[in-house]
Image: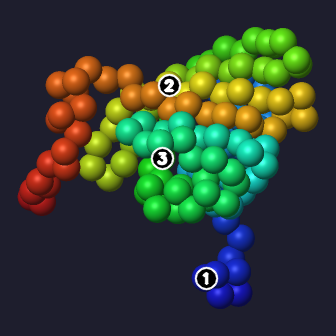
Amino acid sequence: MTATTRPILTRSIKIAGITKPAVLRYFETLNAGDFEATANLFAEDGVLHAPFEEPIIGKSSIATYLKTEARGMQLEPQQGISQILEDDQIEVQVSGRVQTSAFGVNVGWLFLLNSQQQILAVTVKLLASPQELLNLRPHQKFNV
């Protein structure tokens, strides 16, 4: 196999309070760098609300955005809750951290799933103070 045909390995994710397969797969596929698979969890007109960005609408736009912006990120979801809304939609809230090579930050994810368990929307919120956000600039590393 070449590097381009090698299967992407995903690490199973467990989130206290969450059993929805689409939500668990969202974190697994993103952490594995399989951004096409992540985008395919969304409904055709699904929306990703990323911090500091206009809404990203549709599977191909979401995949393109993730390929550009999410490389090297490791999502560390820790706990969540879900509730059934009207029209058989499900709202899932997850809290955790995102780790990059340069920084880590607390994050909240708000998922909206349709009755077919597809993601209608994900809103990603940075849970940091303005000062913490300013400190996210990459720090110079010194090797000893």
Residue 106 visible to the viewer: yes
Q: Quadrant of the N terminus?
A: bottom right
The Cα atoms of the two marked residues, 3 and 1, are separated by 21 Å
Q: What label sits on residue 126 in the rendered view?
A: none
**Foreground tag (3 vs 2):** 2
Q: Is residue 84 left or right of residue 102?
A: right
Going from N to C along the chain, the mark reached first, 3 or 1, is 1
Going from N to C along the chain, the mark reached first, 3 or 2, is 3
Q: Is residue 18 left or right of residue 103?
A: right
Q: Position of residue 34 (x, y in %)?
A: 64, 60
Label 3 sits on residue = 74
Cβ–Cβ below 8 Å for labels 2 and 1?
A: no
The Cα atoms of the two marked residues, 3 and 2, are separated by 14 Å
> Is residue 13 shown above or below 73?
above
Q: Position of residue 8 (x, y in %)?
A: 67, 65
Q: Secondary structure at mark 1?
A: loop
Residue at 38% across / 39% down in the picture?
A: 52
Label 1 sits on residue = 3
Disc 2 residue type?
Answer: Gly
Residue 80 falls in image quadrant: top right
> Is residue 41 shown above or below 128?
below
Residue 13 visible to the viewer: no
Disc 1 residue type?
Answer: Ala
The crowding category of the residue bearing disc 1, from other C-alpha atoms within 10 Å (few below 14, some 14 to 19, many at least 20), is few
Q: Secondary structure at mark 2?
A: strand
The crowding category of the residue bearing disc 3, from other C-alpha atoms within 10 Å (few below 14, some 14 to 19, many at least 20), is some
Q: Is residue 84 left or right of residue 82?
A: right
Q: Secondary structure at mark 3?
A: strand
Residue at 13% across / 54% down in the picture?
A: 141
Label 2 sits on residue = 108
The crowding category of the residue bearing disc 2, from other C-alpha atoms within 10 Å (few below 14, some 14 to 19, many at least 20), is some
The Cα atoms of the two marked residues, 2 and 1, are separated by 33 Å
